[in-house]
């Protein structure tokens, strides 16, 4: 079955940068759309960025121009480069994916990894 392991989170000052990594296994990686999501105790899980098999990307308005999602099919890895981080970006970040792009947009998954904590100090 699909497994996701997120890493790369940490504490950073506002304006700083972090790169998150997602190791995916047990999937037909090349043909799936993958995405990063984030969640806080006060908000529902929201989609941050998505990338298709053809490397087409979509971003939430709140991160557009600051975050970049990418993938490495040979390594079954998905990355999220986060620049100019703001306090409002503080959250637990998760990755997931599916062959169905609509399902990815809806975050319709049966399981999730543990996520990685990103904390931005103001």
Image (spheres, rainbow, N blue to C red):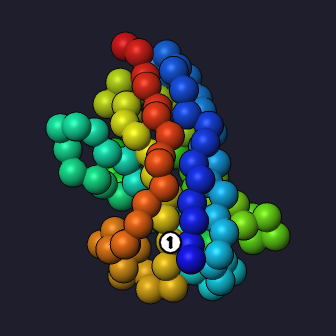
Q: Residue at x 58, y 29 (%)?
A: 17
Residue 64 at least partly seen: no
Q: Which image quadrant is residue 103 in?
A: bottom left
Relative to 44, is 69 on the left or the right? Answer: right
Mark 1: few/some/many CA within 10 Å (<14, 14-19, 20+): many
* Quarter of the figure with the N terminus: bottom right
Most extreme residue toward the front, as rendered? 1
Residue 14 drawn above or below residue 45: above
Question: Residue 96 at x, y = what percent?
Answer: 49, 65
Q: Residue at x 66, y 58 (%)?
A: 23
Relative to 88, is 2 on the left or the right? Answer: right
Question: Residue 54 at x, y = what percent?
Answer: 64, 80
Q: Give the total of numbered labels.
A: 1
Residue 18 drawn above or below residue 87: below
Most extreme residue toward the right, as rendered? 74
* Quarter of the figure with the C terminus: top left
Most extreme residue toward the left, as rendered? 42
Question: Residue 81 at x, y = what percent?
Answer: 60, 44
Q: Residue at x 51, y 21 (%)?
A: 11
* Label 1 residue SS: strand
Q: Residue at x 57, y 65 (%)?
A: 3
Residue 27 drawn above or below residue 22: below
Question: Residue 90 at x, y = what percent?
Answer: 37, 31
Query: Which one is nearer the viewer's eye here, 26 or 70?
Result: 26
Q: To which residue does mark 1 refer?
A: 97
Q: Which image quadrant is residue 41 in?
A: top left
Relative to 68, is 30 on the left or the right? Answer: right
Residue 6 drawn above or below residue 19: below
Residue 99 at least partly seen: yes
């Amino acid at each position: 079955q699909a497994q996701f392991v997120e890493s790369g989170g940490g504490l950073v000052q506002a304006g700083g940068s972090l790169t998150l990594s997602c190791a995916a296994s047990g999937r037909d990686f090349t043909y799936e759309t993958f995405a990063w999501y984030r969640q806080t105790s006060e908000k529902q899980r929201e989609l941050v960025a998505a990338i298709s098999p053809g490397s087409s990307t979509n971003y939430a308005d709140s991160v557009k121009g600051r975050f970049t999602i990418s993938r490495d099919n040979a390594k079954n890895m998905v990355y999220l480069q986060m620049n100019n981080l703001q306090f409002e970006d503080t959250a637990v970040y998760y990755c997931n994916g599916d062959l169905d792009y609509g399902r990815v947009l809806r975050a319709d998954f049966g399981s999730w990894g543990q996520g990685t904590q990103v904390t931005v100090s103001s």
